[in-house]
Image (spheres, rainbow, N blue to C red):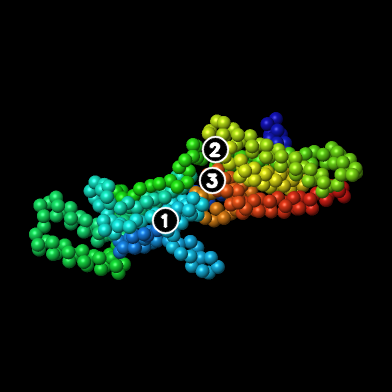
Amino acid sequence: MISPIVRTAIVSLRRDRGALALSFLLPVVFFSIFAVIFGGRRNTTPKVSVLVVDEDRSRASQRLVQGLKEEGSLVAKIRPEPVKGAEQPEYTAATAEAAVKAGTASVAIIIPHGFGENPIAFGPADANRPKIQLLEDSSDMVAPQVVGGLLQKVAMTSLPDVMAEQGSKYIDQFAGGLTPGQRERIDEGLSRLRQQTDNGTGAVTSGSSNGGIIAVTTRAVVGENKNNPMVSFYAAAIGVMFLLFTASGAAGALLDEAESGTLDRVLSSRVTMTSLMLGKLTYNSLLAFAQLLLMFLWGWAVFRLDFWSHIPGFIVMGVCSAVAVAAFGLLLASICRTRAQLGALSTLVILVMSSIGGSMFPRFLMPEGMQKAGLLTINAWAIDGFTKVFWRDEPVSHLWPQVLVLLGIAVVLFAIARRVARRWEYA
């Protein structure tokens, strides 16, 4: 009796293409996505974009900057990308801080005036010693730690003569002094080492930083005054993902009406398919916005999300995101023939969009190719807009890229859905 039951279940599964796809296709797709995110790193540190400002302009600071540029785990930039082929001026402390606040990079390094006079030290901290500033965006908890460690490493590899000179000073100070002959030989060796370093042949090629040879102070320029800084990111990320599920489920009412014959009766009245779908779009948008509002209010009440001071930006991003996901739901409902197909297709597409769009894993921790792929999703643009509002405290006027893209997506998806829905008019 067991064998017929198994055969019947297999035949049923083969007939239900949606269930078949979810059973076999979805795991493979998700495995592939996360394998690309995590598996391609081969146990190496992902490259971190860092802005570098050299205020000292000394020989030591210039060699440190060059070492940062040559470090394989960093993408060190001293100036913005060219605009229309014109080279931009180098970053200053003010422009680098503004760039970190705007999200151009997660970290900026400011090498202060006087750094070249005493770049490294092995002894206790000196309050009067110039300190390198590390400006960070605290939403990225990985990049500042990576840059801080690599900065110490680069100091060791790019300034070997300075390290040797500092070591000789400690020998002279704590080991009873050097004879004139010893001092002369050390000076000759340091001179050769400086010459080799300037020619690019004397740099240390291996070694690890044990910290502290250069003085560094860290300051968070984004998120330092937030009560619970990451709540806004997760509210937007999770909220947009569930908006997609809600909108696709609500749009499925079209399929129920078509199956029951209600749609034919509605279209036989004065209601046109365009006005019907616009009505569905409006209802689904209001439903999605209400769901998003509830999530952010819950974040304010329970997790101390700073909500009320960001009402204008929330309304703009909430409305645009809601309209985009409502149009997306209508498109899925128009393509599918049955509720079962809609459930299977929406689950597959929404989970894939959410995984590469940043709802499941922050995009700034993904490989560069995956970050660009995420820009093809509603999730990425909505999350970027909410991040500008709640994390970076940017004005509503700075939301125009996200607003234009989300509304453009809504218009295109609705137009396609309306085109596909013609099959119900002529059925």
Residue type at the position of mark 3: Asp
Q: Position of residue 75 (x, y in %)?
A: 44, 58
Residue type at the position of mark 2: Asp
Alpha carbon distance from label 1 to label 3:
20 Å
Q: Position of residue 66 (x, y in %)?
A: 36, 62
Q: Is residue 330 above or below residue 5?
A: below
Answer with left or right where residue 170 lies relative to residue 227: left
Q: Residue at x 79, y 45 (%)?
A: 277
Q: Quadrant of the N terminus?
A: top right
Alpha carbon distance from label 3 to label 2:
10 Å
Q: Secondary structure at mark 2?
A: loop
Please tell me in which quadrant of the rendered image residue 119 appears: bottom left
Number of residue marks: 3
Please tell me in which quadrant of the rendered image residue 351 appears: top right
Residue designated by label 2 = 306
Q: Is residue 135 visible?
A: yes
Q: Residue at x 74, y 48 (%)?
A: 331
Q: Residue at x 63, y 45 (%)?
A: 317
Mark 1 and mark 2 in contact? Answer it, CB < 8 Å. no
Q: Residue at x 49, y 39 (%)?
A: 226
Mark 1 and mark 3 in contact? Answer it, CB < 8 Å. no
Using a 10 Å C-alpha cutoff, classify the residue at mark 1 as few (fewer than 14 neighbours), some (14 to 19) or many (20 or more): many
Q: Secondary structure at mark 1?
A: helix
Q: Using the image as rendered, state which of residue 64 and residue 160 is in the foreground.
A: 64
Q: Mark 1 or mark 3, which has the lower sequence index?
A: 1
| Rendered image: mark on residue 393 | 3
Q: Is residue 299 above or below residue 58?
A: above
Q: Using the image as rendered, state which of residue 170 and residue 400 is in the foreground.
A: 400
Q: Position of residue 258 (x, y in %)?
A: 83, 41
Residue designated by label 1 = 93
